Image (spheres, rainbow, N blue to C red):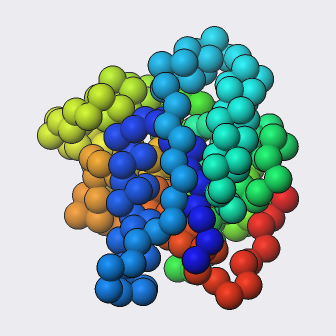
Amino acid sequence: MRTIGMLGGMSWESTLEYYRCVNEEVRRRLGGLHSARVVLYSVDFEEVEARQRAADWDGAGALLGQAALAVERAGAQILLLCTNTMHRVAEQVQAAVGIPLLHIADATAAAVGAQGLGCVGLLGTRFTMEGRFYVERLQRAGRLHVLTPPAADRELVHRVIYQELCLGQVREESRQAFRQVIAALVGRGAQGVILGCTEIGLLVGSQDSAVPLFDTTRIHATHAVDWALAATPPGVPA
């Protein structure tokens, strides 16, 4: 079993789910008392979020690159950036280390493709929904048509993520609002919806949608276990 490196804390609420998912998946596959070999580096999200607000992506990338190097030096053989938004600096983080970074959008595109879907909705932070770094990666990896909510819904989703979910607050009124956002995407033709923020799975699940929901936290974690347990590790797209 190879050692999985996790660069987490963005937020720690969802990093808990990463840790849970990789260990549950290893136990499911290997049985007994098996658990995952993990190196976890949890950053101070306040420092990262301040750089997000200031649009200092180079500074954020440098901060995460240093943390990723510490993960590698601790013995990790593969790296998970446990956040969708900060994949905006994935190339900078990858350049800082010699171990492969498993891109969350690639794993997600493969999961969508495995169900034969061509059109998906995308929920996430404003940075993820409005930036090109994530949508273009999905399009390139899975040839997907990606729909995002209108501006008012994007603002609602972003606010709930930062002001509630990242603080451990799960509110029924927000769940209802997300159900409406999801339904609107389905009404526009989405055959599935990507939960493109690692906290969203804390709020909504399959029971909240008429179409499949793709929880990027679980997808990413499961992909890491695939890699960690494979006889020959699969290739990692550039």
Location of residue 228 in the rendering, given as x and y in whole percent from the top left corner: 60, 73
**Residue sticking out furthest to the top:** 54
Q: Quadrant of residue 212?
A: bottom left
Residue drawn 66% across the image and 56% down it: 75
Q: In this view, does 70 lie to the left or right of 202?
A: right
Q: Which of 151 and 110 is in front in this view?
A: 110
Q: Is residue 93 above or below residue 100?
A: above
Q: Work out whether residue 190 can be spotted.
A: no
Q: Is residue 3 above or below residue 19?
A: below
Across and down, in percent, residue 38 comes to 51, 59
Q: Does residue 210 lie above or below 153 as drawn? A: below
What percent of the width, then of the height, locates residue 133?
72, 42
> What residue is drawn where x is 79% and y is 73%?
235
**Which quadrant does the C terminus fall into?**
bottom right
Q: Which residue is drawn at 75% across and 27% down?
A: 62
Q: Which residue lies furthest to the front in this view?
A: 74
Q: Quadrant of residue 220?
A: bottom right
Answer with the quarter of the image where residue 67 lies: top right
Q: Please report the residue visible at 62 percent of the width from the left and 17 percent of the height from the top.
A: 51
The answer to whether 30 is drawn above or below residue 48 in the figure is below
> In this view of the protein, can residue 236 be seen by the observer?
yes
Q: Quadrant of the N terminus?
A: bottom right
187 vs 153, nearest the viewer: 153
Q: Nearer the viewer, residue 74 or 84?
A: 74
Residue 167 in the figure: left or right of residue 223: left
Query: What is the total number of numbered labels drawn onto the structure image?
Result: 0
